[in-house]
Image: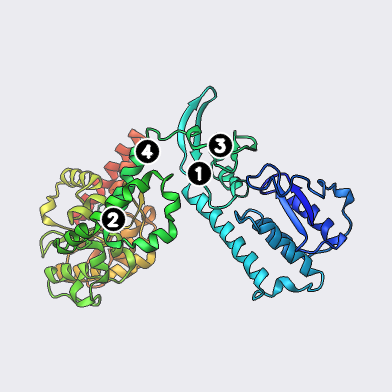
Amino acid sequence: MASAWLDDETDFDGWRQAARRFRLEGVTPAEARFAVRGAAGQGSLFDTPTAPPVEASQVGELRVPKDFVDLAREVILHRSQDRFDLLYRLLWRLGDEPDLMKVASDIDVCEAMERAKNVSRASHKMKAFVRFRRMEDEAGEAWVAWFEPAHRVVEKTAPFFQRRYTNLRWSILTPDGCAFWDGEALTYGPPATRDMAPAEDEIEEFWKTYYASTFNPARLKMKTMQGEMAKRYWKNLPEAALIPELAARSAVRTEAMVSAPAPEPNARLAKATAPIHERGPADGLVASSLAELEKGVQGCRRCPLWRDATQGVCGEGPRQAALMVVGEQPGDQEDLAGRPFVGPAGQVFNAALEEAGIDRADVYVTNAVKHFKHEPRGKRRLHKTPNAGEVTACRWWLDQERGLVKPRVVLALGATAGLGVLGRKPAVTKERGEPLALEGGAAALLTVHPSYLLRLPDAEAKARERELFVRDLMRAKALL
Ligand code: URA
């Protein structure tokens, strides 16, 4: 019998050196014994180990496939008593069977692979189930966890926590050994006991409340859950204390959920998924009235802007208005109200109309684009200028509004409105104020958009531009 002492349960280097030496000396697997110094139950067998700890220099050349070394590193972490023997048996057999590691059906290879898989699973569970508790020491805040891994995976898994919680000071205490991260170095220490870790902390109740509120009784599958979260881990998971009660009540809660009246469907989802005939008249509708046109706009899918808008915003005003004013697109408030120019730009517009001596009630006010284009920024929806494709798609409706209202003058506010009205991108500053002939005999006028006046930071420039804007409105009135 040839025996070797290993320094500890995961002493891979010690095992490797002893195993190499045994192999080179022709010690058969039946004769080889490996024992861990100080491990329970091994004293009597190994009181006098025949092979003292071996120095690397004593060990001769022995080539083994890398696959084997990688596998052995994992298998050593398995809790089984006979893992050293299994690995030595494989090493021994590799002498005559150099391709042994490729034979997945071989009983020893298969066993070693299974144990490596168990080790890998234990490491994965450690990543998932370690629960840190906050505490304070003389150096400040520290996070401490007590964990009982299925196999000896502390050192294998600690680097994961180092990467994940680099900025915290933490310790993971286990019955096999401990891992410590102080923000600079990862170190390991001897085994700990459960009472060395805090039993709970002040955020534990929040965590439990969160867990209970995310628990869906209708989706409870006890077996699957235990497959993922084996019962052996429960005692160290604060949330696991809730599982028996949550599970016991799940049938009653599921019943209540099933018999509760169905909630209102999500309006946006319903809009997106409704069959086209339920959304409103088809996109190509030719409307015979403004009311019909309004319905067509609500069902419009000519461009994607409808998706994020609350609703389409059509024009408003007298059916036979002589003056039509065209803005760019509804803003945030218009989108919610379903009416054009009711927000901040609308205030500027209304005041300028009044100054120009025009009653808004006599004007048909609309927009080149009927849906609000925006992007979310926190809780706000930020205006985005519609592109030429979107403006062109929406001309389908603007042209019909013009056809139904038949205004004598169409005043376009800004370049986007100009594109909608003229069908080409205008040079607003150059073309401003000059009547342009439209198909059907009406005259188009261009001016700036009222939101431009709102954005001007300089009070003097603002007053000057406002005056020019009012002058353009008066010009439009004069053309009627
Ligand atoms: N800006 C526009 O162009 N139209 C509106 O309806 C509101 C703001």
Task: Between residue 106 and residue 139, name the one nearer to us.
Answer: 106
Residue 179 x/y as whole percent: 59, 39
* Nearer-N-terminus badge (3/2): 3
Specify whether 227 is left or right of 169: left
Identify the residue shown where x is 50% and y is 35%: 143
Residue marked by disc 3: 192
Please rate how many residues cluster around mark 3, counting C-alpha atoms within 10 Å: few if below 14, some from 14 to 19, many from 20: some
Q: Nearer the viewer, residue 150 or 320?
A: 150
Q: CA distance from mark 2 to mark 4?
A: 20 Å
Q: Which residue is mark 2?
A: 247
Q: Which residue was labeled with disc 1?
A: 147
Residue 98 or 438: which is nearer the viewer?
A: 98
Q: Are marks 1 and 3 in contact (CB under 8 Å)?
A: no
Residue 287 image position (x, y, % from top left): 16, 75
Measured Cα–Cα span from mark 3 to mark 4: 22 Å
Q: Nearer the viewer, mark 2 or mark 4?
A: 2
Element type at mark 4 = helix
Q: Which element carries disc 2, helix, strand or loop? A: helix
Q: State which tag comes first along the sequence, 3 or 4.
A: 3
Dot 2 and dot 4 residues touching (CB under 8 Å): no
Cα distance in 3D space between marks 1 and 3 = 10 Å
Q: Which of pointers 1 and 3 lies earlier in the amino acid sequence?
A: 1
Q: Which residue is mark 4?
A: 204
Looking at marks 2 and 4 on the same chain, the residue that comes earlier in the sequence is marked by 4
- Which of labels 3 and 2 is toward the front? 3
Q: Earlier in the sequence, mark 2 or mark 1?
A: 1
